């Protein structure tokens, strides 16, 4: 039996994993925390890592959670990292994020949820059902602005160049947040899947996890 620690995407929680079958493994979820003032991603990762109570865990990270998994793996030995709809290093960040970073746009324009942009955000995330719309709306309504502004800043300014030796990458071919053209040789490409493939393509993901967690 493995100990699996899951980290959800930006502002999300364990419900995003609701359709995933982890088999007979021991499953844990690490929740996002409010960042301290001017906290670095390295310091934040250390706080997240303090919740990992078992040696050599498997880390599964969705989107920003995948980036955080990479940072945690710099601090402790892990059996495997499974990145889902995520990136493993700065080279994989899309051009639009690098431009936001270069122009400091995220610091010039406060980042907060605007209802008028909800349809665009849902499209980019690959939302397919009313249930998903309602879940994401709830996430937006409860989003802590200190956390959201910090998280966006960490994503667009992530400087990591380290490639974990023991990671696999699951990515959708129609991911609009992290386009697959920037991803370096993902082990698993899910055809026509968007950013929310954990929910919309759970069957395929479960088959992959069955193999990778064996």
Image (spheres, rainbow, N blue to C red):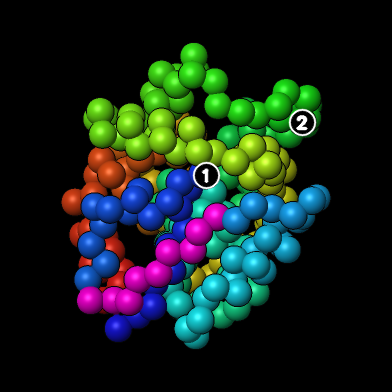
The residue located at (65%, 74%) in the rendering is 75
Magenta stretch contains residue 1: no
Name which of mark 1 and mark 2 comes first in the sequence: 1
Task: Using a 10 Å C-alpha cutoff, classify the residue at mark 1 as few (fewer than 14 neighbours), some (14 to 19) or many (20 or more).
Answer: some
SS class of the residue under badge 2? helix
Near mark 2 (Cα within 10 A), the count class, few <14, some 14-19 or many ≥20, is some
| Position of the C terminus by quadrant | bottom left
Residue 209, compared with residue 67, is above or below; it is: below
Residue 98 drawn above or below residue 48? above
Q: Is residue 71 left or right of residue 82?
A: right
Question: Looking at this view, is 159 or 43 the one in front?
Answer: 43
Q: In which quarter of the image is residue 46?
A: bottom right
| Residue 128 x %, y % | 27, 29
> Which residue corresponds to mark 2?
107
Q: Quadrant of the N terminus?
A: bottom left
Measured as percent of width and height from the top left, residue 57 is found at: 45, 77
| Position above or below: 97 against 74 | above
Q: How many labels does the image show?
A: 2
**Magenta stretch bounds:** 24-32
Percent position of residue 44, x then y: 68, 60
Q: Can residue 7 be seen in this view?
A: yes
Within the image, what quadrant is residue 76 found in? bottom right
Residue at numbered disc 1? 10
């Amino acid at each position: 039996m493995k100990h699996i620690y899951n980290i959800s995407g930006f502002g999300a929680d364990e419900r995003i994993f609701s359709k995933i079958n982890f088999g007979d493994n021991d499953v844990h979820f690490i929740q996002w925390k409010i960042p301290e003032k001017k906290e670095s991603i390295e310091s934040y990762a250390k706080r997240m890592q303090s919740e990992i109570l078992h040696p050599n865990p498997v880390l599964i990270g969705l989107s920003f959670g995948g980036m955080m998994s990479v940072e945690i793996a710099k601090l402790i030995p892990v059996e495997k990292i499974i990145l889902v709809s995520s990136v493993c290093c700065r080279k994989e960040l899309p051009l639009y994020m690098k431009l936001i970073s270069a122009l400091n746009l995220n610091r010039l324009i406060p980042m907060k949820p605007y209802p008028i942009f909800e349809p665009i955000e849902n499209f980019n995330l690959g939302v397919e059902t009313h249930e998903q719309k309602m879940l994401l709306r709830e996430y937006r309504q409860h989003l802590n602005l200190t956390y959201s502004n910090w998280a966006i800043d960490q994503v667009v300014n992530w400087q990591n160049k380290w490639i974990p030796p023991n990671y696999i990458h699951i990515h959708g071919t129609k991911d609009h947040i992290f386009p697959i053209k920037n991803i370096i040789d993902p082990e698993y490409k899910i055809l026509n899947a968007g950013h929310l493939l954990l929910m919309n393509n759970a069957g395929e993901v479960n088959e992959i996890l069955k193999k990778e967690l064996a």
